[in-house]
Amino acid sequence: MPPPEKVDPPHKLTFATNSVRNTTFSIENDKFYYEIVTRFWHPHLTKINKYDYEGRMVTCVAEIESLPKKEVKVRFNTPDAEGEWVRGSDFVKCEGGSVGGTFTADDGEIYRWKTHKRCLQLVKADDEEKVPIAEYHPFKRHFFVFRMSQRAQLEVKPEASGVLEKIIVSYLIVERRRRQAKIRTKLERQ
């Protein structure tokens, strides 16, 4: 009897910085390399660029626009055209006052961001076992103060690599929402 097939390990997208406006997500061999950039001359527009090192191509796969006192808008671009703007609340539907939310991939599959032990996890909405498809691991510091001992990571299972752009954009929206809620609660306490 042959041994059971090995399960492919998850892709560990490592963050370069802790910002949700200017950072990079990449795996060790740079098969997946995404740059999240907000230019100072467009402070309300965040672009998600995908680098293809083999083809030496840079493509803007998505954009997030967050104007003051207006709702966040998102658009996904194709290689030959720009997409239509969609409200962020229509893309990632928030469930009440919770931090997470749900979004629908191109294949019709519904994914849900949830918090588990103060870390974000992405699960399929119809999965009863709630096995995470993607999981965020925050950075760690030496003695909780000094330089980072471990960078933040987003672990994505290989079967979800087809919807990786939507996972990244939805993560950025949910993380921004979580950070803004954290700031609001601090201000309310003062």
Image (tube, rainbow, N blue to C red):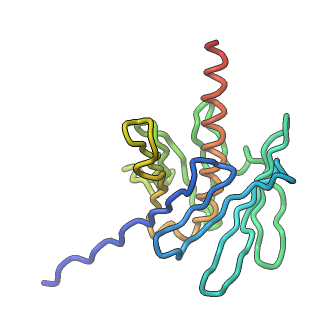
Q: From the viewer's perspective, is 176 left or right of 6?
A: right
Res 104 quadrant in image: bottom right
> Residue 82, percent across and down?
83, 69
Q: From the viewer's perspective, is 142 left or right of 18?
A: left
Q: Residue furthest top?
A: 190
Q: Residue at x 44, y 49 (%)?
A: 137
Q: Residue furthest left?
A: 1
Q: Residue at x 82, y 48 (%)?
A: 43
Compared with 91, 161 (above or below) is below
Q: Residue furthest bottom?
A: 55
Q: Residue at x 66, y 19 (%)?
A: 187
> Residue 7, percent across and down?
32, 71
| Nearest to the observer: residue 141 or residue 157 | 141
Quadrant of the frame with the C terminus: top right
| Nearest to the observer: residue 21 or residue 162 | 21
Q: From the viewer's perspective, is 120 left or right of 19?
A: left
Compared with 105, 67 (above or below) is above
Res 25 quadrant in image: bottom right
> Residue 122, percent across and down?
50, 51
> Residue 118, percent across and down?
45, 36
Quadrant of the frame with the N terminus: bottom left
Compared with 95, 148 (above or below) is below
Q: From the viewer's perspective, is 77 left or right of 177?
A: right
Q: How many marks?
A: 0
